[in-house]
Amino acid sequence: LAKTTQPISMDSYEGQEVNITCSHNNIATNDYITWYQQFPSQGPRFIIQGYKTKVTNEVASLFIPADRKSSTLSLPRVSLSDTAVYYCLVGGNDMRFGAGTRLTVKP
Amino acid sequence: KAGVTQTPRYLIKTRGQQVTLSCSPISGHRSVSWYQQTPGQGLQFLFEYFSETQRNKGNFPGRFSGRQFSNSRSEMNVSTLELGDSALYLCASSLGGRDTDTQYFGPGTRLTVL
């Protein structure tokens, strides 16, 4: 049983804001939510992590509603170099990567 | 602070051979996890080592094994290679464990089995 569900793919244009939502209905009380970015033939790169409400860093924001059953990664003003696969992970010993969301940014 | 390093970056082997991959974690990190990534199966967890002990194991055959040394460096071994073992093998290190702390990934080792 998949622990997280994300859209398989998304398209956007340069300069737009992109929001990727992840569903995690069975999140446990102690679980954190972490997002990674991966380019072809490279290891995943940590983007952001949060537990509840909103977290912001220099590259992204993470919105988590009160029930924590979903989370939304927000990428402001994307560029062509943001084209990658984005993974949402929920913590715990059975943590596993899902299929991720393939984001394609077009000029 | 240096990131996670993996050696070699690329490897070509033939069926039936064995291979050893190496991972050096970020200094101070005690947990090393290994993953296999293929186009068909995505990123799959192999195992995690913490302070030289295997803590968790994914659903892989016994041909896949690993170990961790006292300096936290880790090696992964695959014996009797099969064509389906061709993949990108990634290791990730974290301060505590993969279930509690952020994992930082290395660049991976691309293994091709002919």
Image (cartoon, grey):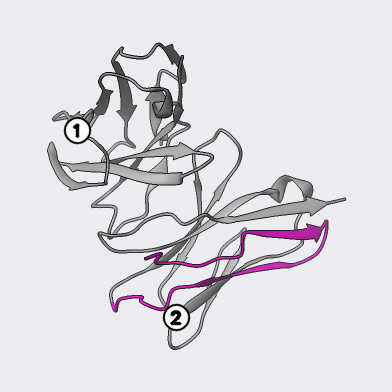
Q: Residues within 10 Å of mark 2 (few under 14, many from 20)?
A: some
Task: Residue B5 in the image: state x and y as whole percent.
Answer: 40, 28
Q: Secondary structure at mark 1?
A: loop
Instruction: Determine the main secondary structure of the stretch shown in magenta.
Output: loop
Q: Is residue B50 above or below residue A41?
A: below
Classify residue B7 as left or right of residue B62: right
Which mark, by number, is residue B62?
Answer: 1
Say which quadrant the N terminus of chain B sits in.
Answer: top left
Circle 1 chain: B
Image point (36%, 22%), residue name: B82
Classify residue A71 as left or right of residue B33: right
Image point (71%, 65%), residue name: A76
Q: What amino acid type should be assigned to the residue bearing mark 1?
A: Gly
Eye-nearest disc, 2 or 1: 1
Q: Is residue A9 one of those drawn in magenta?
A: yes
- For the residue pair A73 and A87, the one nearer the viewer reads as A87
- For the residue pair B86 and A62, the one nearer the viewer reads as B86
Which mark, by number, is residue A69?
Answer: 2
Between marks 2 and 1, how big is the CA–CA gap?
A: 36 Å
Task: Residue A107 in the image: state x and y as whole percent.
Answer: 88, 50
Residue B31 in view of the camera: no
Q: Residues within 10 Å of mark 1 (few under 14, many from 20)?
A: few
Task: Residue A17 in the image: state x and y as whole percent.
Answer: 75, 67
Q: Quadrant of residue B6?
A: top left
Q: Quadrant of residue B105?
A: top left
Q: What amino acid type should be assigned to the residue bearing mark 2?
A: Lys
Circle 2 chain: A
Q: Is residue B21 above or below residue B98?
A: above
Q: What is the span of residues highlighted in magenta in the rendered image?
A: A1-29
Residue B91 in view of the camera: yes
Residue located farthest toward the right when viewing the structure as drawn: A107
